[in-house]
Image: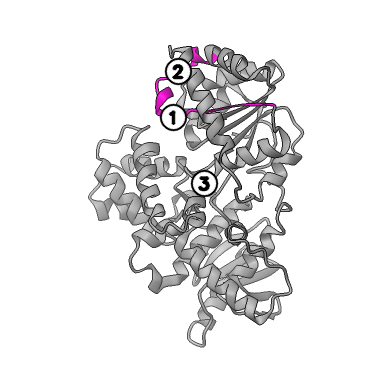
Amino acid sequence: MIAKSLLETVVRDQRQEFAALGKTVSRTMLHSMLAYRGTAACVVKGVRRCGKSTLLQQLMAAKYPDDFYYVNFDDERVADFTKEDFQPLMETLLEAFGKKTVIFFDEIQNVRGWELFVNRLLREGNRVFLTGSNAHLLSRELGTHLTGRHVDVELFPFSFAEFLRARGDEPRPPWSTAERVRLKKALLDYLDRGGMPEAVVMENDQLAAQLLQDIMQKDILGRVSIRKPAEMRSVLRFLIANAGNPATVRSLMNNFGIRSANTLQKYIACAEDSYLVFTVRRFDRKIKRLDRSPRKVYCIDTGMVFRISPGVTERRDALLENAVAVHLKRLGKEAYYYRGGGETDFVLPRDRLALQVCTEVTARNKERELRGLREGMRAIKATRGLILTLDQEETRGKVRMLPVWRWLLEQEGPQGKGRRPGKRRTPQPGRA
């Protein structure tokens, strides 16, 4: 058991630190969270340091300015916190701050058995907000004890619109020639720096590389037993450096001399659970082939790709494709890639949309890009196709060419009016 005197010191320190955060970049997701009127626990998931705590602070300030308890379990002083400490913790909070009805628990997955206590808080009529950075732990515990009593919100690093907002820039159409040039330049900076809030706000070019190390060490090796940590790091760095390239378990096993497919699959699953990477499957109407086909791996932040892949500036297409993949995931889209005689970077069957991504359409690559796009459109019976480039714009029939920066901004919408979270992120009880 942790002494109540220490608990009091921790909660007072944390509340003071939280109050001192000052002005932060408003997140588009905040609008949806403010609009939520349900009573289920709201769970904010996402990669380490993507802004989950700051989002909670923005929510508190806007909706619960003086009616909340806040505890961050990613604090070495409460590293030994157990479920038996919850009752003394609540007594300490009551004594220190008086009766409150809204409770914010940061990085809750650090406490084994937390879901039982949260269930009790909900039964007692409290509003509960949680954050976590491990999908497997959260999903397992939410699905076991909080079925139907939680809603999930997945937070990502800054979108391009939020990246601009952090710089005090909120462009609105119509865009002048000068603005188009400026937005293209800003997009290139966004691709290289990434969207991790601290990297953007503090203009820290080294943060992405350090954060990658922290995720591997704290969120993977610190939680899962890995026999060969160096091997795991090498595999994950390879996948991130080659973001957007199809990879099979067999080819990776051969490349790294790994004998067990289960071992390799475990490495990738751990990286996905920590929100470091995600995979996109090849489109196929036959389920068996769909599951066996090579998958493309993308990193949650282009800044990490840029930092560990020295040659990526020569293949700018890879960063553009990764940024589009992340934004599609942010929007909750069900995306695949298509490969037949040609290749389509993304097909969205439910939206009947196919997307091709390239830095520039030239006389040399135009036929290839169009052929691949049209194949993907036919495969899913798409009503429209998009070719996303750095700055080209043109429409011919069902195919539209559009600058990536414009597509990113138009998909997000104005500040505070972003897409209401879809099935992945909408407050809908019971989604784990």
Q: Residues within 10 Å of mark 2 (few under 14, many from 20)?
A: few
| Residue 368 colored in magenta in the image | no
Quarter placement of the C terminus: top right
Q: Is residue 247 visible?
A: no
Decide: is 310 above or below 431: below
N-term-proximal mark, 1 vs 3: 3
| Label tally | 3
Left or right: 235 in relation to 377: left
Q: Residue at x 53, y 24 (%)?
A: 11
The residues bearing labels 1 and 3 have C-alpha atoms spaced at a distance of: 17 Å
Of residues 123 and 70, the one drawn nearer to the viewer in this rendering: 70
Decide: is 318 above or below 129: below
Mark 2 vs mark 3, foreground winner is 2
Q: Residues within 10 Å of mark 1 (few under 14, many from 20)?
A: some
x, y (%) of residue 393? Answer: 64, 79
Of residues 214 and 343, the one drawn nearer to the viewer in this rendering: 214
Decide: is 72 above or below 257: above
Q: Quadrant of residue 226?
A: top left
Return the residue at label 1.
75
Q: Kindly identify the amino acid type of the residue bearing the numbered disc 2.
A: Leu
Return the residue at label 3.
50
